[in-house]
Image: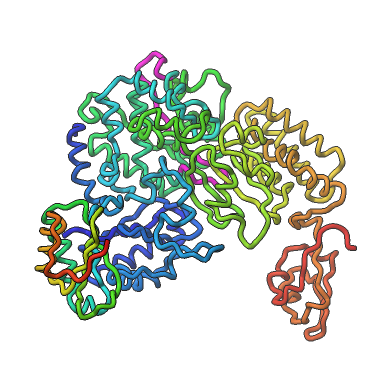
Amino acid sequence: MNRRLDVLVCSGAACVSSHSAQVRSALAREIEAQGLGDEIRLVETGCMGPCELGPVLLIYPDGVFYIHVSQDDVAEIVDEHFLKGRPVRRLLWETPESRKIAEEKKQIPFFEKQHKIVLVNCGEIDPESIREYIASGGYEALGRALTEGTPGQLIETMIASKLRGRGGAGFPTGLKWQFVAREPGSTKTIVCNADEGDPGAFMDRSLLEGDPHAVIEGMAIAAYAVGATHGYVYVRAEYPLAIRRLKHAIDQARDAGLLGSDVLETGFSFDIEVRIGAGAFVCGEETALIASIEGERGMPRTRPPYPSTSGVFGQPTLINNAETWGNVRHIILNGAEWFAAIGTPSSPGTKVFALSGKVVNTGLVEVPMGTTLREVIFDIGGGIPDGKAFKAVQTGGPSGGCIPAEHLDTPIDYESLKKLGAIMGSGGIIVMDEDNCMVNIAKYFLDFTCDESCGKCVPCRVGTRQMLGLLEKITAGHGESDDIDKLRTLGKVIAETSLCGLGQSAPNPVLSTIEHFGHEYEAHIHEHRCDAKVCTSMIRFEIDREACKACDKCRRVCPVSAISGTPGKPPYLLDAQTCIRCGRCIEACPFGAIAIESGEPN
Amino acid sequence: MKLEELRQIRERASKELSLRKGEARAKIVIGMGTSGIAAGARDVMAAFLDEIAVRNLTDVVVTQTGERGLASSEPIVEVRIDGAQSVTYGLMTAERARRVVVEHIVNGNVVSDFVIETRG
């Protein structure tokens, strides 16, 4: 019998952690119990995007999209929708502002503005089924590459497409291929850099979880183009699901004769190994990554020689980021002109972003280059939650910078972001609202890079520590008037003299916040004021005498006994000297009578 | 495996994804409200699905809807074909369902005996 419904259960890591596996098993049980097993197929897919709303389900052919599905909803979904054809409206997506319920996935604003190339299969096919990948056009690009045209033509196509590395630096991918192809020698290596370390970034993870064959196919095409026989995917151990699905996909491809010796019976041989990293941020840097693959300590070295000349075990090595690999098959299938026409002339194609922070729809999005930050944050992301004001957006993680509201209409491309002191980076976008203190944000990122510095070169090892010390001093309320200049000078020296990208970009979060939010630094230093009410040294808690009902709840939770009073006899008193500003009294107060104030008392 | 074989696998496997592509030429909407189910809509749907499978029709989807309000004519089935009037059939049975697939969906001739409404 033909199937009439495909029920797609998002099994990306975010939905798995909100218990999508239990929803899936409950669906399987209920479908069997209703005798619908022959008509309905349950498919586990990769990330569908709106992680905030998980677990999510997508039902075809109608395209009904359910959000926040729990096990308890399953019986109703199967009985009402699958059996009787009435979608369960309370589980549909409702746009907050218009209160409009989206009957179908395509009506949802989150999806409307996206353009999926790399993620086209993510959330649409079963990542553990090579059959579904092949059905969706998979391995056709590899087949054509091996049978039609020459390796040189493939490289020409990649150059003409103007694809740039999606790991962050934006180096033209085709040129990189050409460098490796031109190297003499028969032992060359392909590497996929999936060592995604930025806090809040999960693009590579989602691609490997949702469509691992796309990465494998891209690598195999490149191997043929440059004459490599062996490949590595370097992925961190904290991505167990991505590793499992990737290994499974590699095994399937090998069994199908799409990897290994004599691929598609053309005489071409290529195989891939998975190397699992321990999660050091510096291992995303290509020379450190290569050292780690070789079994050495993950530390960068000077370049040249570049990996294209001397990479893994001294052999010419072609290293690209996972998302870059995901673009390759589409360029081969649709042609360089097709790709070059998407996005902007200097940055063609799309970019995948992991949207997080103070934004309504957090999750995974793919948009054409040239889309503005405003469109991504407000149209796709749904804006800032709880009616708060937008303050800044941070792109590029610890190597990137913060962009203020006046630049929200900046188109996203490599050059425009760089001009603002930020970078494209691998694709993390963290949105901040009025409750974020920019000095504290800069301190957070610097604390991260300082911790992750491998220690090989002095500017990075010592310099980031010095910068962090200055930021700690400022946020503790001991800032001095020349601290901002010191930070600027140190930042410039570290950026210019560090050995690798980690150190060279580490000052960016500090320098960009000084540039765009200098007044916050000034307020911290000169007025001991933190307007976002984050830096605990500059805030005080006050009990509103009118609002206090003397319920005694705050006094009981205070860990340092800073609150005193008698139940039933308002107001209670808070001793500012003893208070450690932990905020537990605010959570406990049922009347909202405790407020945070910044600066000196009036 | 040769490229030819890969393409054959794709040919066969692409049917499995046809529901997700939204490229259906024809849509069969079966009324599955309480009265529809009581009148035998489940058997009608099973017959549609089976006949579509037997005839290897890859561009037809079967979906359901709720109560249509004409309980005396249940099971009710609507057939929507691209570029043609939508046709609603009443008092459907498994056998009538198979006739609708052959005559209407494959050959394009509306089975006028059980039509209760046409809309365009």
Position of residue A252 measured from the top left corner of the image (x, y, whole percent): 27, 42
Q: Is residue A321 left or right of residue B28?
A: right
Q: Determine the residue positioned at 41% across, 69% down.
A: A89
Give above or below for A66 relative to A526.
Answer: below
Magenta span of residues: A180-204
When asked about the image quadrant of residue A586, the answer is: bottom right
Q: Determine the residue positioned at 38% across, 44% down.
A: A120
The residue nearer to you, when weighing A91 against A491, is A91
Residue A202 lies in the magenta-colored region = yes
Quarter of the image with the C terminus of chain A is bottom right
Give above or below for A36 relative to A204.
Answer: below
When asked about the image quadrant of residue A550, the answer is: bottom right
Its colouring scheme is: rainbow
Position of residue A134 measured from the top left corner of the image (x, y, whole percent): 27, 41
When asked about the image quadrant of residue A458, the answer is: top right
Residue A302 lies in the magenta-colored region = no
Give above or below for A572 relative to A129.
Answer: below
Res. A19 visible in picture: no
The residue nearer to you, when weighing A303 against A202, is A202
Quarter of the image with the N terminus of chain A is bottom left
**Count of number-bearing discs:** 0
